[in-house]
Amino acid sequence: MSAIATPLPNVGHQPHSLLRAARYNPLATVGAALVLLFTVLAVFGPWIAPQDPALIDLPSRLQAPSAGHWLGTDELGRDILSRVIFGARISMLVGASVVAFSLAIGLVIGSVAGYYGGITDRFINVIVMNAFLSFPGILLAIAFVAFLGPGIFNLILALSIGGWVGYARLVRAQVLAAKEREYVEAARALGASDWRIVRRHILPNIIQPVVVQAAIGMAGAVLAEATMSFLGLGVPPPVASWGSMLNDGRSHLFDAPHLVIFPALAVMLAVLSFNFIGDALRDFLDPRSRIEAGL
């Protein structure tokens, strides 16, 4: 059966191609560096943060950035740098979990709809997907968290409920095109099961646009987490979150603007970095774009 599948690309020149792609698209390099930075902050936050992010020091409240507090302190005297670092843990964890759950659900539902077609496809595409698309995803998440209560697990589940539809529609469209290819017909003629055909012959050949969508989806998940935390529906205090920091600092926007500036910059850089990576992956995985760029 392995001879039926399309041949794998030559991976011998991939490191060289990646280096050339990095020179061609410097924004992708910046995005990768920022993602690496946020990942390091998320993993090693307890050892990197200069102070306990929940430590209250009222005599030091609303201090401007200084040598003792590089990003200043908030209205309770907590170190903003430490809270930004710990906020990266929440954003990266929620973003990765939401994308993973949404992608897993979308792969299953989209593959079933695209592969079997007919009544199954019409029911999933016309009724189920359109029903979820008729409501904004953030409103579904707000309603879900408001019903079950704030918490990181409820937040991840709420954002995943509305996030799988985009992946499912993309996978469905790719499967509809891939299932008519010659290698799929040959595998079916040799008696391969539907599960084997989808797993071994269809999914490996449609995964590239899904990976690009997942990278861009990380940006949306980070922004959605910040939005939910800003509304008070994210992780409960005293856990540090960029969105909750923005909510706490909006009342001091004019007398202590650093309370808003630094968490807002963290959200902006995180969203931009994943968007840069998504755009770079789209260009790198597209053969026409690679030929035009000389990659």
Image (spheres, grey):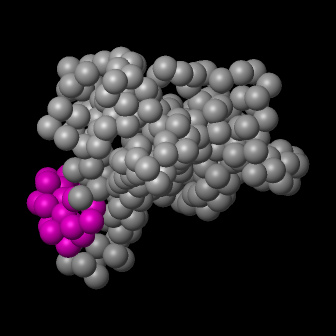
66 vs 290, nearest the viewer: 66
Which residue is painted at 19% across and 41% down in the image?
66
Which residue is painted at 25% across and 43% down in the image?
65
In this picture, residue 164 sits left or right of residue 202: right
Residue farthest along the front direction in this orientation:
59
Quadrant where the image shows the C terminus: bottom left
Which residue is painted at 17% across and 32% down in the image?
68
The stretch of residues the image draws in magenta is 9-29
Q: Pinpoint residue 50: horizontal percent, then vertical percent.
A: 21, 25
In this picture, residue 173 sits left or right of residue 89: right
Q: Pinpoint residue 16: horizontal percent, then vertical percent.
A: 11, 60
Main secondary structure along the magenta-highlighted residues: helix
Residue 73 visible? The answer is yes
216 vs 246, nearest the viewer: 246
Residue farthest along the bottom direction in this orientation:
292
In this picture, residue 19 sits left or right of residue 202: left
3 vs 24, nearest the viewer: 24
In this picture, residue 28 sits left or right of residue 20: right
Q: Pinpoint residue 255: horizontal percent, then vertical percent.
A: 43, 50
Q: Pinpoint residue 29: horizontal percent, then vertical percent.
A: 22, 59
